């Protein structure tokens, strides 16, 4: 599978990042199988806009969590990760809570909207995808192919 990583630099040797803000699936190296989404990520950077391209081969010996779609389990997992609660997966893959969806998650966490209202609000959003490599051993399954500047 081809994966993309939007950045402001060429990333030939990805590393698991464990600093900054909590993200949907916790700390790690984030990629997507949607090139358009990686371009959006790259364009959010202040200086330099680079899309890195990788080949990914799934390793069965890794502890992988996959969410095929936004579900109750996905929502609870994202809320926990955004709160800083750690998990033990090597790789987590599934839909992304973009800024709009994250606002709805925040409203849900604060009790401003119900679960039912959350699902109604996110029902018609465009498709998203992310895969995060959470451990150093998971990065072995990711091979740098090329990069290009925007």
Image: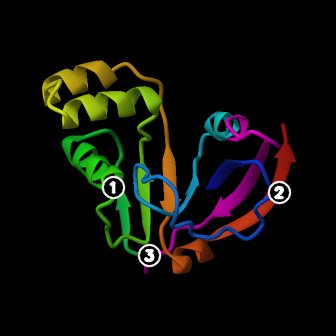
Which residue matches tag 1?
81
Of circles 2 and 1, the one toward us is 1
Which residue matches tag 3?
60
Residue that sits furthest to the right in the current view: 149
Of circles 1 and 3, the one toward us is 1
Q: Secondary structure at mark 3?
A: loop
Q: How many marks?
A: 3
Q: Which mark is residue 100?
A: none
Q: Secondary structure at mark 2?
A: strand
Of callouts 1 and 3, the N-terminal one = 3
On whether residue 51 falls in the magenta region, the answer is yes
Q: Which mark is residue 146?
A: 2
At which x and y percent is residue 46?
A: 75, 39
Q: Secondary structure at mark 1?
A: helix
- Residue at mark 2 to residue at mark 3: CA–CA distance: 25 Å
Of callouts 2 and 3, the N-terminal one = 3
Of circles 2 and 3, the one toward us is 2
Residue 144 is left or right of residue 38, and the answer is right
Q: Residue at x 23, y 26 (%)?
A: 118
- Residue at mark 2 to residue at mark 1: CA–CA distance: 31 Å
Residue 38: which quarter of the image? Answer: top right
Residue 113 vs residue 96, the one in the foreground: 113
Q: Residues within 10 Å of mark 3 (few under 14, many from 20)?
A: few
Q: Residues within 10 Å of mark 1 (few under 14, many from 20)?
A: some
Of callouts 2 and 1, the N-terminal one = 1
Q: Which residues are magenta?
A: 42-62
Q: Residue at x 26, y 54 (%)?
A: 80
On whether residue 48 falls in the magenta region, the answer is yes
């Amino acid at each position: 599978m081809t994966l993309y990583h939007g950045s402001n630099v060429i990333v030939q040797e990805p590393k698991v990042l464990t600093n900054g803000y909590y993200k949907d699936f916790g700390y790690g190296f984030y990629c997507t199988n949607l090139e358009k989404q990686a371009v959006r990520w790259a364009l959010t950077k202040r200086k330099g806009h680079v899309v890195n391209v990788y080949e990914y081969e799934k390793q069965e010996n890794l502890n992988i969590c996959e969410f095929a779609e936004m579900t109750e389990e996905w929502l609870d997992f994202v809320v926990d990760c955004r709160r800083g609660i750690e998990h033990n997966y090597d790789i987590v893959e599934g839909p992304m809570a973009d800024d709009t969806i994250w606002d709805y998650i925040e409203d849900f966490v604060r009790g401003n909207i119900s679960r039912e209202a959350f699902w109604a609000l996110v029902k018609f959003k465009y498709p998203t995808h992310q895969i995060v490599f959470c451990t150093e051993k998971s990065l072995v399954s990711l091979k740098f192919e090329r990069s290009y500047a925007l």
